[in-house]
Amino acid sequence: DPVRPSGVSSTDAEHAAAIDAAGRIAGYLAGQGFPEPLIADSGNGAHLLYRIDLANDEAATGLVKGVLATLNALFSSDVITVDTANHNAARIWKLYGTVSRKGDFTPERPHRRSGIISAPAEIEIVPTERLQAIAGLLPRDEPPRRKKGGRGIDLASWLLSHGVAVRSTKPWNGGTLYALEECPFSGAHKDGAFAIQFANGAIHAGCHHASCGGGAQRWPELRTMHETPAKKEGSGERRVSRAPGGKEIEAPSAAKNSIPGVAKNPAPPPDEYRRRALEILRTGDALAFILDTFNKTHVGDRTVAECLAYSVASRSVENTNGLHVSISGNSGKGKTHACTTMLNLIPENSRLKGTVSDRALYYDDDLRAGTVFLFDDVSLSDDLQEVLKSATANFCEPIEHRTVTTERKLRVCTIPPRCIWWLAKVEDPGDDQVMNRMLTVWIDDSIEQDRQVFEHIKNHESKYDRGPTPDDIQVCRAIWEVVGEEVCEVTIPFARQIGSSTTQNRRN
Ligand SMILES: [Zn+2]
């Protein structure tokens, strides 16, 4: 599946990215002894169909789940995801030849007809041991943590301070899996390497390529590669044990002053992005850089972008209840687009994938402090209204919301501290108490804005204006990464001069 806003069809670029990824995954699985699959275009994304011959029981379901989890860990990125939900035998599937009609048909997000891209003459059965090999490729259980050596390594900080670039970060069996940008064990390929930190602190690193051990534990080796000084000075070998600023990073103490959880497992940006981010923060205008990058994708609405940026920054303020944003204005005028554009500029581990729903809050037990939640196009359930109310009232504290389902089962959702709430297209966010804590901003729904958006689309499609570079986006994320590393007190020297037209409603 391409990563895209929910409830709409994919753009041509998103659609192509999914089909491209399916080809890469099929290639990888062929190398792992899988027969040729049927490859299909779902209309929005891509399907790989493999024939299996297993009993319809729990063990088989677990095996299929395991295969999908491994593929998700190895291949999902900012651009595409492997849908791990497709593991049950009773799944209802696409009838190829039918048209996918998700959301409205627009030139940018058209409805497409699904269809078979390629099919082998005979669809062979995948041998069970091939499924087992993929399902068992990555360690699932925590390896025992070594006692000696005293304080443990914080893998995220270690990767960052040793210049090991991370492509994506995702939860892994209670811990975190970092997909590495380049394979440290081989020069023959770039993809495939990963490092996992389990909940107990134990670390496993490896690469899925057979030539690199097919996922075998290589963390001690990776560590030695970076921590042992090079034999010769200037031999070109890396001996970095310092952060770019020259300050030694010590994981446990560095975490003390940061947004708890945010800096604990940051996706370390590659050194170069961090270097540029630090340069902008020291000598440039970080806000302007972020807003300019935003405007390369979203025309106008600079004020909306500013409010969203301030709200992200408020995570790093000690003495605040946080700035949360509610966007008003006519529908269809880009409220969602503004939010998702800004969301894309913050680090992946600081945002909830997709939009907020009961499901996301109750079943995602990997929420981090400082997460940005986007409520998009939803009417809030009573439960969600309560959650929103207590989370915005107790910004600096974690909150626990308990409720009972219709089946009388207890459900608990825990919201970590310093989370930010963005409301776009929300019908009824609850009572005034919630709205009083929101920074309300209007989307530009003027005719002039409409004209400029149209011009932008034309420029973009004619490749006259290519939009933000992936580098700019990474630098924005690195800026937020750096800003998120500290929480500081803010004083407003002119606070005493602020007046309000009505005492009843200071929102005005
Ligand atoms: Zn490798």
Image (tube, rainbow, N blue to C red):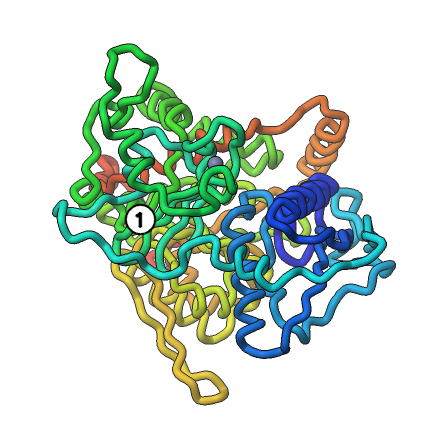
Q: Give the quadrant of residue 507.
A: bottom left
Q: Foreground residue, 198 or 219? A: 219
Q: Which residue is mark 1?
A: 203
Percent x, y of residue 385: 44, 70
Indicate left or right for 173 with 40 as reference: left
Q: Is residue 496 visible?
A: no
Residue at image position (43%, 51%) is: 372
Residue at image position (26%, 50%) is: 260
Percent x, y of residue 242: 23, 26
- Element type at marker 1? strand
Inspect the image, locate mark 1, and give the three-letter code of the amino acid beneath it.
Ile
Q: Foreground residue, 399 or 216? A: 216
Residue at image position (70%, 39%) is: 13
Indicate left or right for 108 with 356 as reference: right
- Residue 292, above or below 194: above
Percent x, y of residue 277: 38, 26
Which residue is at the far top?
234
Percent x, y of residue 303: 50, 38
Instruction: Give the class, few, some or many, for how many residues have Cα within 10 Å of label 1's Cα (few <14, many ≥20).
Output: many
Q: How many discs mark residues in the rendered view?
A: 1
Q: Is residue 330 visible?
A: yes
Which residue is at the far bottom?
408
